[in-house]
Amino acid sequence: MTDEDAPLSSKEELNEALKSVLFKAYKSGVNVEGGFECRNGAEHPDWDVIVAEVEKNDVSE
């Protein structure tokens, strides 16, 4: 199992995974702002994800 396949067990881990995916897409020239439908088949819930750029504060993580 790779790190990408490892299960996420907390909101912090989810946040780190999302940051990684968004950064990779941004660096590859993908426009990451907007809405994304995440359809997962009949057995699992679907999600609507909205991504918006936010103003940086003085201390960026």
Image (tube, rainbow, N blue to C red):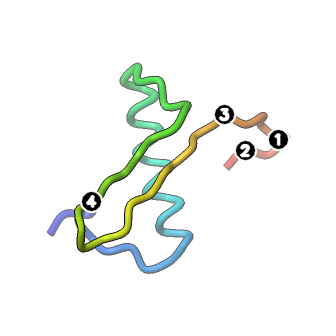
Crowding at label 4, few (<14), some or many (≥20) Cα neighbours within 10 Å? few
**Image quadrant where residue 21 sits:** top left
Q: Specify the farthest residue to the top.
A: 29
Q: CA distance from mark 2 to mark 3?
A: 13 Å
Mark 3 belongs to which amino acid?
Answer: Glu
Q: Amino acid at mark 4?
A: Glu
Counting other residues with Cα less than 10 Å from the Cα at mark 1, is it few (<14), some (14-19), or many (20 or more)? few
Identity of the amino acid at label 1? Asn
Residue 53, labelled with which disc? 3
The spot of residue 1 in percent (x, y) is: 14, 69
Q: Secondary structure at mark 4?
A: helix
The kind of secondary structure element at disc 3 is: loop
* Residue type at the position of mark 2: Ser
Q: CA distance from mark 3 to mark 4?
A: 24 Å
Q: Which residue is mark 4?
A: 4
- Left/right placement of residue 9 relative to residue 52 reads left
**Disc 1 versus disc 4: distance between alpha carbons?**
29 Å
Label 3 crowd bin: few (<14), some (14–19), many (20+), radius 10 Å: few
Q: Which residue has dot 2 on it?
A: 60
Disc 2 from disc 4: Cα separation:
24 Å
Looking at the picture, does residue 24 appear above or below residue 9? above
Residue 57 numbered mark, or none = 1
